[in-house]
Image: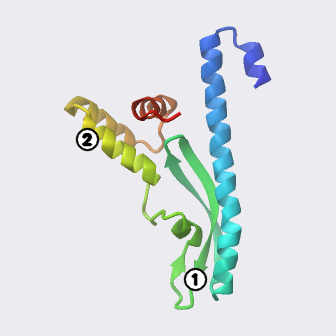
Amino acid sequence: MHQIVKETPDVLAMEEKLQQLMVSWFRDLVGEALTLLDDPVREAKKVEGWDVETRDARTVPFLFGPVQYSRTLMTDREGISHYPLDEHLSIQPNQRYSPLMEVKTAEMAAESPYRENGIIRDVSLHQKYLNFRIVHVFNTRFGIS
């Protein structure tokens, strides 16, 4: 952070770089928190007789950017595979975006003129990750700070 402040002569550019850095730190912290939550969820399922298969990484785009976390694949007593952490978080197996991102995209599309609607749809459905500009638009539009 000090390096950015020291080397960026333009206050506007400095603030943008610092905001990107803070968002990056926040995404990393959320990913770490979700990964840490996997341990107690896994242990609770082990007590129920579930078996651990493997540990996988998953990336879910949130309004503040993509968050990567590790979760455990387990099989229940009937031999059906589950990701207990995803189930605990109510994230469906084929869900591509966080629930809030899906809701905000739908709200924005419903409130926007046809031209904007196409842009919102294209950006939110066809790009793997939202860029900083799109996150800013979401945040401004919905008053998220």
Residue that carries the numbered disc 1 in the rendered image: 75
Lateral position of residue 59 relative to residue 55, left or right: left
> Mark 2 against mark 1, which lies toward the viewer?
2
Q: How many marks?
A: 2
Q: Could one spot residue 100 in this view of the protein?
A: yes
Which residue is identified by label 2?
110
What percent of the width, then of the height, locates residue 23? 61, 36
Q: Where is residue 70, by image quadrant?
A: bottom right
Q: Amino acid at mark 1?
A: Thr
Residue 73 in picture, x, y percent from top left: 60, 73
Q: Nearer the viewer, residue 104 or 96?
A: 104
**142 vs 71: above or below:** above
Write the residue at 53% across / 79% down.
Answer: 81
- Residue drawn at (63%, 80%), measured in percent from left and top? 45
- For badge 2, the amino acid type reads Ala
Residue 35, above or below 81? above
Mark closest to the chain's N terminus, 2 or 1: 1
- Which element is circle 2 on? helix
Q: In the rendering, at what x and y percent does residue 90 appear? A: 48, 64
Q: How is the image coloured?
A: rainbow
